[in-house]
Structures are given as C-alpha cells and as structure tokens.
Image (cartoon, helix red, strand yellow):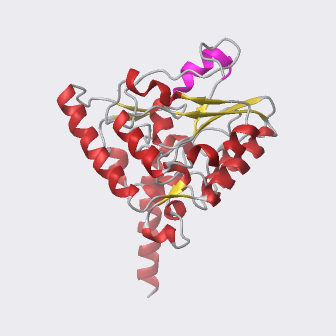
Amino acid sequence: MKPFLSKAIFFALILSAIFMFLGRFANGKTDAFYLRFTTPKQKNLILGTSKAAQGIQPAILQNYFEEPFSNYAFNLNHSPWGEVYYKSIQKKHSKQNNGVHILAIDGWSLSNWQIGELSGANREDEGPLSGFHFVDQHPNYYYLLQYTTFLDILNPPRHNINLHEDGWLEIYDIPLDSVSVTQRTTKKVSTYSGMANTATLSTSRSLFLLKTINYLKQYGEVFLVRLPVSEQLYSIEQESFPEFESMIQSSIQASDGYLDLSKMNSELNYSDGNHLTPSLVYLSHKKSPIGF
C-alpha cells in the first residue's frame, strides 16, 4: 500500500508542478473570464453581462475620466444582478474613494426564466463567481484548476476571443457581412423568444441591483446605462418586461445618472443583434460627449 501511495503522491506533485508551469502561459485567450480574476482589486468598475463585457471599453472611458477602469462584466448566466454577483463585486472592489462605477442594466439581467430558478434557485449559483474567493491572484491557479484544463492553456478552444487585461472582451475574426449577421441575429432572436416564454422580472434581483448601487456609492459615483440592441431583440424585451422602467426607478434615484442608449438601437451595428460590434460606448462625466 505504501509504494502505491508514494507513487500516487509523486505523480500528483508532478502534475501540479506541470500545471503551475503551464499556468504562467494562461492569458486572454485561455477563456472569456480568466484575466478578470488575475488583476488587482479595482477602484473603477464596469459591471453587467456580456453586452457590457464586449460593448464598454475601459481604455475609452479612461480618456474621459482620466483614471483606469476595469471591466468586471461576464455574461447573462454568470453575472445577472443578484447575491452571487454582489458578493463577487465586493471582493473585486478596492474600497478606494472617488471611484466611478458603470452598471449596465436590462430586463434580462433582472429576470429569471430557467425552470430551476423559477422555483427558488439561481442560474449563477454553479458558475465561477459563486463562492469563488480568489479574484485578484496572478497567476490564478485556483481558477485554472477549477475551470480549465491543460488543453485550454496550450490550445484554447475559442480562437476568436481576446480578453484584455482591463477586462474588455474582444471578439474578432467573425464575418460581419449582412448575411452572416442576419443568420446570427435570427438565431439570437429565436433563443430570446424561447426564454421569453417563462421570463419574469425578479424582485430579488432588483433589490440586489439597488444594494449594489448603495454599496458602491460609499466609494464614489454610480451610473446606470441601458445598452442598445437590435430592434428585434428590443421588441422582445419590451414585450416580456413591460414593468421594467417602473421596477428600476428606485435604482435610478439612488444612482448618479441613467443613460438609456436604446434610443440609438437603429443607429448602431451588432454582430448578432445583441452585442455591439467592436465600438466605443461613451458615458457622461465632465468631458464626455453624452450628458445625463
């Protein structure tokens, strides 16, 4: 028995050493989340789902606010407004004063639609933000061991993503001709139409949005933004959540401003009807071109 245990421990140590070595090569192509867990705690945060992850570029905001931003937005399954995201934001925030925080909101990020969560569970409970304490380690071996493999590091499964160190998720090398965009948009419309069959706005999510705003207000300003989408997806959202505007009123009042960019839906370009093509999203503050 002893020789077996000795060999098992030896091979475990070898595998761990190899993984730790490979971990030094993990980067913005490893997956769409990893680098956000490797940067230090942050003063200025961009928060929301994948629309914010792809659509709000920290480097552009820095030109207007004159301080670095970090995009800590993930996607609709992992970072809807709720307790899981709230706790992760607390871990990532540096607790420095005079910060600026930009929160992207929409009906989907404040709603439930999966069967399990309609009966009390939350879709984000099993994701990487749930109970994960190590959000500022570099390299982050805790994340790599739990959510990646050797192959993910050596040969990333998605070759058209690049997660920048500031958290902006760049999607590239996808065809943006009208036929390709229409095909992806049709698929996205079908997906959201299916979700709309059971989707309901969540009072709990709304309360955690307000709680997040009040928490961040201790350390600076908080701005809300509703990012644009294609007219087709906007229509589905409006029909699914007619009470959205009334539900967010308390959050708007608690914030330092709300910018509804849905008025620009038809003026902008999307890769799939839901995500902006690599572009610039400007928000109001001092020198910026759009005012609240």
Q: Is residue 136 visible?
A: no
Residue 188 falls in which quadrant of the image? top left
- State which region is magenta: 56-67
- Would residue 66 be found to the left or right of residue 178 on screen? right
Residue nearer the viewer, 23 or 166: 166
Percent from the top left, x then y, of residue 196?
40, 55
- Is residue 58 covered in magenta? yes
Percent from the top left, x then y, of residue 213?
72, 43
Residue 289 falls in which quadrant of the image? top right
Percent from the top left, x then y, of residue 45?
64, 35
For the N terminus, give its image quadrant. Answer: bottom left
x 44%, y 45%: residue: 237
Position above or below: 265 against 51: above
Residue 58 falls in which quadrant of the image? top right
For the C terminus, give its image quadrant. Answer: top right
Percent from the top left, x then y, of residue 249?
68, 43
In the image as oriented, which residue stretches furthest toward the left?
Answer: 179
x 77%, y 45%: residue: 214
x 31%, y 45%: residue: 189
x 79%, y 36%: residue: 219
Predominant SS along the magenta part: helix
